[in-house]
Image (tube, rainbow, N blue to C red):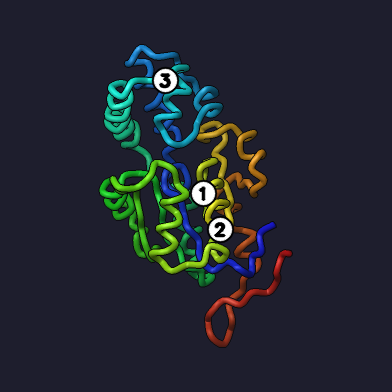
Amino acid sequence: MTRFAEIDHIVWDWNGTLFADTAALIDATIDIFARAGLPTVTRARYQEHHTQPIPLFYDRLAERDLSDEEQQWLAEAFQETYVRYRQNLGLHPQARDVLRQCADAGFAQSLLSMYPHEKLLPLVETADITAFFRRIDGLRTDEAAKKAPHLRRHLAEIGARPESVLLVGDSVDDALAARECGAHCVLYHAGRDALHSREHFEALDVPIAENLRDAVTALLGHRQPNQDTGRPTWTTTTP
């Protein structure tokens, strides 16, 4: 069980968490598999098979091991198609308010994404939320395609103790990364457009939230501002 009094830093995921683009991720995948003549992808199949790294996910959806050439085509086609589907999307409706509430409560915050770093930064800047974060990291070319090593490096860069960190994400890979690194985790499930079926989350034994506000409500409820210093004071510890 999460010990709220330990936590002083929140690491946010981007795609599907702060940025409400899971519908675009799913629709783009459905599109490229149809264009490639591969087995039909439905939302249910996407949610059933979603995993990291993405090439393994594509193998599962294709029901066979894809060639390097096929994987390369799918990767390139996805980036182009995803951008098209993403055009009219933006932040989760609660994202800005929740980020502000966490900042006002005294939590440090950072952003960690598996989206390419050079493409991530302009999106965050356009959303006008850069100031909330101590550090923003997207995926760089020298990093593994799973989140655990990415999270470990991120925590080292910001000098955070894993046990003092809450990762808020929307994927099994987020939960596994937090567990491997010794951090806490809450998963946001977006319902019909979630990346995973809810059953995948329930097997992980981590808190599941229906929206971003719920993801941090319990944490914020254990912190109140100190009237003398303006800094937060923990009022309760959950064992």
Asked whether the residues under the numbered discs 1 and 2 touch, taking CB atoms below 8 Å apart as contact, a structural biologist would say yes
Task: Check disc 2 and report its element: helix, strand or loop.
Answer: loop
Task: Check disc 1 and report its element: helix, strand or loop.
Answer: helix
Which residue, given by chain and number where applicable, does mark 2 sit on? 183
Please identify the quarter of the rendering in which residue 24 is found.
top left
The quadrant the C terminus occupies is: bottom right
Q: Is residue 191 visible?
A: yes
Q: Amino acid at mark 2?
A: Ala
Which residue, given by chain and number where applicable, does mark 1 sit on? 177
Q: CA distance from mark 3 to mark 2?
A: 34 Å
Q: CA distance from mark 3 to mark 1?
A: 25 Å
Instruction: Count residues near mark 3 (Cα–Cα under 10 Å), then give few for <14, some for 14-19, many for 20+.
Output: some
Q: CA distance from mark 1 to mark 2?
A: 8 Å
Instruction: Count residues near mark 2 (Cα–Cα under 10 Å), then give few for <14, some for 14-19, many for 20+.
Output: many
Which residue, given by chain and number where applicable, does mark 3 sit on? 65
Task: Check disc 3 and report its element: helix, strand or loop.
Answer: loop
| Residue at 30 percent of width and 35 percent of height | 83
| Residue at 30 percent of width and 28 percent of height | 81
| Residue at 37 percent of width and 20 percent of height | 66
